[in-house]
Image (spheres, helix red, strand yellow):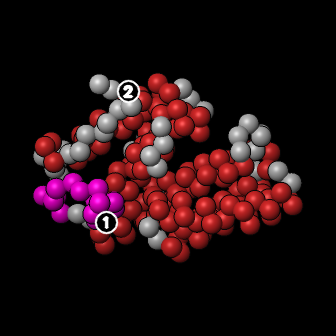
Amino acid sequence: MKRDELEEAFVKYAPMILRRATSLLRQPEEAKDVMQDVFIRAMTERGGFEGRSEVSTWLYRITTNLCLNRLRDGSRRRELEALHLTPPDAPLDPGNPEQRILVQRLLAEADPSWSEAAVYVLIDGMSHDEAAALLGVSRRTVGNLLARFEEWARARLKTHLTSDQLVPIEREGAA
């Protein structure tokens, strides 16, 4: 990607990247930092874009990975836990802002490949086919990554929530 193409991409895709980062991080200032980091990375890794996908897809993936890395940052995780950690006996309600913090914590602690698949399918609402294309894996692998994430998350939450309070992850194509 040439410099003038990158400048054009910034004008065109910066709002999308900022929305993406804000939705994952829930902190506007951090989202702005990530947006800048995305374009810095795109500029320094211009050879990383091989043209096999759209520029927006490439930038979206960089954004997701940078956000997940931020969530994994230990000091950031401790800050979020101190400010927003849900009490252990609270029921899991995905519409609740505190529960989103819990989900962010799980995403930060899980295996990176599981987290990335979970973000694309469970948060972004992508189909398994769409996530597979973005991740560069098969549709079946996406299902396996989600199953591993679900199993791990259930075990992780078991000490905090009873199993009847957990919302099952619906699998695509499951009867």
Q: Of the residues shown, which amino acid type is indicated by label 2? A: Gly
Residue 79: x and y in percent read 37, 69
Q: Quadrant of residue 136?
A: top right
Residue 66: x and y in percent read 57, 55
Q: Is residue 5 left or right of residue 140?
A: right
Q: Is residue 52 left or right of residue 167?
A: right
Q: Of the residues shown, which amino acid type is indicated by label 1? A: Pro
Q: How many marks?
A: 2
| Of residues 175 and 154, the one drawn nearer to the viewer in this rendering | 175
Residue occupying the point 42% across, 30% down: 143
Q: Is residue 95 magenta?
A: yes
**Secondary structure found at label 1:** helix
| Image quarter in which the C terminus is found | top left
Residue 131: x and y in percent read 52, 38
Residue occupying the point 77% across, 39% down: 50
Residue 3: x and y in percent read 86, 59
Give the magenta range.
87-101
Asked whether residue 113 appears in the rendered view, the answer is no
The residue that disc 1 covers is 97
Q: Quadrant of residue 81?
A: bottom left
Mark with earlier residue (1, 2): 1
| Of residues 123 and 104, the one drawn nearer to the viewer in this rendering | 123
The residue that disc 2 covers is 173
Distance Cα–Cα, label 1 vs label 2: 30 Å
